């Protein structure tokens, strides 16, 4: 498979559940990102990893916990979420973070999360 | 100061017409302005980007117009086709700062 893949594509969870989202990139990139996409809102950058090190955490609640075991894989661990956390969660990768937004980001198809 | 304001929120254009989406920003430090295109069920993908040293950039039917003094930039889609129906996001960044995104425009091209 090529590009950026995300699993699962859809996830329904209760507020007391613990689940994880997985992202894998096959592009040889060194930076990986988690975004939250809600309808009619700008994409919200959540976390950035560059060479496996977390470089940005945009004041994301602790109920979201990222993990980047290597440059190709990124996880988002979820626990005790709220209904307002329902959204499309997008993973992206880029060559590196050094060029900021000027480094083209390649997105996965996203995980549609519904919190009941 | 870090916002990028995008309009309209949604747009319906007849096939063959011109689609125009506008974005405005405040931070004069921004020096890179990309547009991303997102089809249903897919993630956004870079469509075209411009730097402020040029006023226009064209790639096929897609053109970015940039007005530095007005702090505005826009995407024009000429001869719009049903396959162009998607959500379009403008964004901006500077130095090694991350992208600041607009809220998106849902474009529908009517056959």
Image (spheres, grey):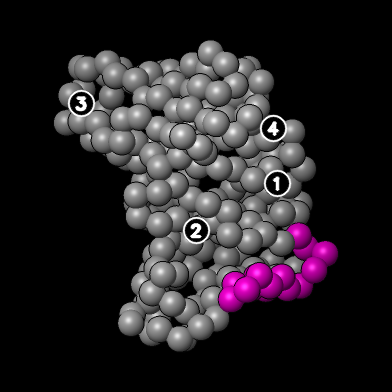
First reached walking from the N terminus: tag 4 or tag 3: 3
The residue identified by callout 3 is A13
- Label 4: state its secondary structure: loop
Residue placed farthest to the top in the image?
A69
Alpha carbon of mark 1 to alpha carbon of mark 2: how far? 16 Å
Pair 2/3: label in front? 2
For image coordinates 38% across by 39% down, the residue present is A110
Q: Is A15 on the left or on the right of B32, as rendered?
A: left
Q: Is residue A45 visible to us here?
A: no
Alpha carbon of mark 4 to alpha carbon of mark 3: how far? 33 Å
First reached walking from the N terminus: tag 4 or tag 1: 4
Q: Are marks 4 and 1 in contact (CB under 8 Å)?
A: no
- The chain holding disc 4 is A
* Whole-percent x, y for residue A12 in the image: 20, 30
Query: Disc number at residue A96?
Result: 4
First reached walking from the N terminus: tag 1 or tag 3: 3
Magenta-highlighted residues: B51-65
Q: Is residue B61 magenta?
A: yes
Q: How many residues crowd around disc 1 within 10 Å: few (fewer than 14), some, or many (20 or more)?
A: many
Q: Are marks 1 and 3 in contact (CB under 8 Å)?
A: no
């Amino acid at each position: 498979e090529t590009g950026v893949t995300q699993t699962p594509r859809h996830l329904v969870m209760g507020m007391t559940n613990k689940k994880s989202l997985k992202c894998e990139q096959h592009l040889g990139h060194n930076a990986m990102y988690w975004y939250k996409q809600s309808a009619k809102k700008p994409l919200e950058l959540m976390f950035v990893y560059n060479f496996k090190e977390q470089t940005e955490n945009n004041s994301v609640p602790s109920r979201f916990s990222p993990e980047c075991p290597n440059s190709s894989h990124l996880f988002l661990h979820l626990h005790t979420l709220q209904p307002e956390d329902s959204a499309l969660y997008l993973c992206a990768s880029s060559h590196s973070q050094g060029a900021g937004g000027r480094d083209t980001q390649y997105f996965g198809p996203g995980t549609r999360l519904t919190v009941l | 100061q870090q916002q990028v304001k995008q309009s309209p929120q949604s747009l319906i254009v007849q096939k063959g017409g011109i689609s125009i989406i506008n974005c405005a920003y405040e931070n004069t430090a921004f020096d890179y302005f990309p547009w991303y295109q997102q089809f249903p069920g897919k993630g956004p993908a870079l469509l075209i980007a411009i730097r402020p040293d040029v006023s226009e950039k064209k790639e096929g039917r897609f053109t970015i117009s940039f007005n530095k003094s007005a702090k505005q930039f826009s995407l024009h889609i000429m001869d719009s086709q049903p396959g162009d129906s998607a959500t379009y996001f403008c964004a901006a960044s500077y130095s090694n700062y991350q992208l600041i995104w607009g809220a998106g425009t849902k474009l529908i091209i009517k056959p």
